[in-house]
Image (spheres, grey):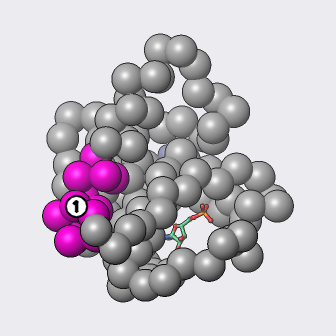
Amino acid sequence: MPCLFCEIVAGRIPARVAYQDDTVLAFHDINPQGPVHVLVIPKRHITSLTDLTPQDDVLVGSLVRRARDLAQAEGLEDRGFRLVFNHGPDAGYSVYHVHLHLVGGRKLGWPPG
Ligand code: AMP
Ligand code: ZN
């Protein structure tokens, strides 16, 4: 079965795109966990955090800085926001293509559920 997020990158499955460039795509989560919930992904398929190599350091940095920029654009800089990478069953990792969650716009509990 094709990777869901690769299908979104290819434009074969629709998404509400918030940002894209040559290497990064950001789109709104279909099941938002807050007023703002955006997924920031590499356009290239990487299955999970455990597959990252030192060659991906710049890419990972760009995911984090893009999520930060989107948070600022959503007006979340002062009130705060959260960035999350999940991996594996305990974290509920469900789409096997690396993605960074940006969640904000409400008070977020800690520790997370
Ligand atoms: P994770 O649990 O970290 O694997 O997160 C996967 C995320 O992808 C969940 O928050 C889902 O709501 C989200 N998701 C699943 N399918 C879609 C889709 N077609 N468009 C946007 N977000 C999706
Ligand atoms: Zn993929």
Q: Which residues are magenta?
A: 66-77
Residue 68 in the figure: left or right of residue 84: left
> SS class of the residue under badge 1?
helix
Viewer-closest of 6 and 104: 104
Instruction: State whether label 1 is within 8 Å of ligand 1.
Output: no
**Residue at 48% from the left image edge and 57% from the top image edge:** 83
Residue assigned mark 1:
72
Viewer-closest of 91 and 108: 108
How crowded pointer 1 is (Cα within 10 Å; few <14, some 14-19, many 20+) is rated as: some
Residue 42 in the figure: left or right of residue 19: right
Residue 97 in the figure: left or right of residue 10: right
Residue 19 in the figure: left or right of residue 102: left
Q: Quadrant of residue 105?
A: bottom left
**Residue at 48% from the left image edge and 38% from the top image edge:** 45
Q: Is 109 situated above or below 92?
A: below
| Residue 86, horizontal then vertical, whole percent | 64, 54
What is the total number of numbered labels drawn onto the structure image?
A: 1
Which quadrant of the rendered structure holds the C terminus?
A: bottom right
Which quadrant of the rendered structure holds the N terminus?
A: bottom right
| Residue 99, horizontal then vertical, whole percent | 49, 51
Q: Quadrant of residue 7?
A: bottom left
Give, as a three-letter code, the residue at label 1: Gln
**Residue at 33% from the left image edge and 53% from the top image edge:** 67
Q: Main secondary structure of the magenta part?
A: helix
